[in-house]
Image (spheres, rainbow, N blue to C red):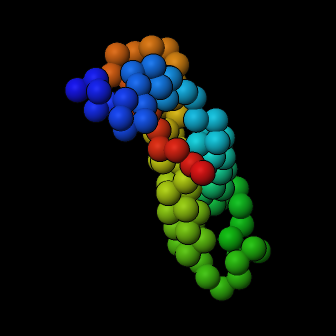
């Protein structure tokens, strides 16, 4: 088994190094998605509470069209970013079952 690993071009030290390597690009994109999701969901909440007048910004559309758009886009941004940051936080803390190798690499 050990000879097969060396023949493939990697050894145990290389595998362990890759597992503990922090994917900075993926984490920066996760922070961007998470922040964008929070902003969009905040705009959704402001529309729903009446703090933003939809007739001024989107005349003739009512409140449903822009509010639902901000909600869907905010949720689609917030969930993947939050999940990736959750994995990264637990991997940083050393929680068993979490590692940085669970975060997909961005190239």
Q: Residue at x 68, y 71 (%)?
A: 54
Query: Quarter of the image holding residue 3?
Result: top left
Q: Is residue 61 left or right of residue 100?
A: right
Query: Quadrant where the N terminus lies?
Result: top left
Say if 58 sits above or below 23 in the image. Answer: below
**Can residue 4 be seen in the rendering of this structure?**
yes
Say if 64 sits above or below 35 in the image. Answer: below
**Can residue 71 be seen in the rendering of this structure?**
no
Say if 54 sits above or below 14 in the image. Answer: below
Q: Residue at x 66, y 85 (%)?
A: 60
Total numbered circles: 0
Q: Is residue 51 left or right of residue 7?
A: right
- Please state the horizontal and vertical placement of residue 38, each as a whole percent of the image: 61, 46
Q: Nearer the viewer, residue 9 or 82?
A: 9
- Please state the horizontal and vertical placement of residue 62, each as a whole percent of the image: 59, 78
- Residue at far left of view: 1
- Please state the horizontal and vertical placement of residue 42, each as a whole percent of the image: 63, 50
Query: Quarter of the image holding residue 94?
Result: top left
Q: Nearer the viewer, residue 52 or 75?
A: 75
Q: Is residue 40 left or right of residue 78?
A: right
Q: Residue at x 41, y 25 (%)?
A: 11
Q: Nearer the viewer, residue 75 or 96?
A: 96
Say if 31 sits above or below 98 in the image. Answer: below
Q: Residue at x 71, y 61 (%)?
A: 52
- Residue at far bottom of view: 60
């Amino acid at each position: 088994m050990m000879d097969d690993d060396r023949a493939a071009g990697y050894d145990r030290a290389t595998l362990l190094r890759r597992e503990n390597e922090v994917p900075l690009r993926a984490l920066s994109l996760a922070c961007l998605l998470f922040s964008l999701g929070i902003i969009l969901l905040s705009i959704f909440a402001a529309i729903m509470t009446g703090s933003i007048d939809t007739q001024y910004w989107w005349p003739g559309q009512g409140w449903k069209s822009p509010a639902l758009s901000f909600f869907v886009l905010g949720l689609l941004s917030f969930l993947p970013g939050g999940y990736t940051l959750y994995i990264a936080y637990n991997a940083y803390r050393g929680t068993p079952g979490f590692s940085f190798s669970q975060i997909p690499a961005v190239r």
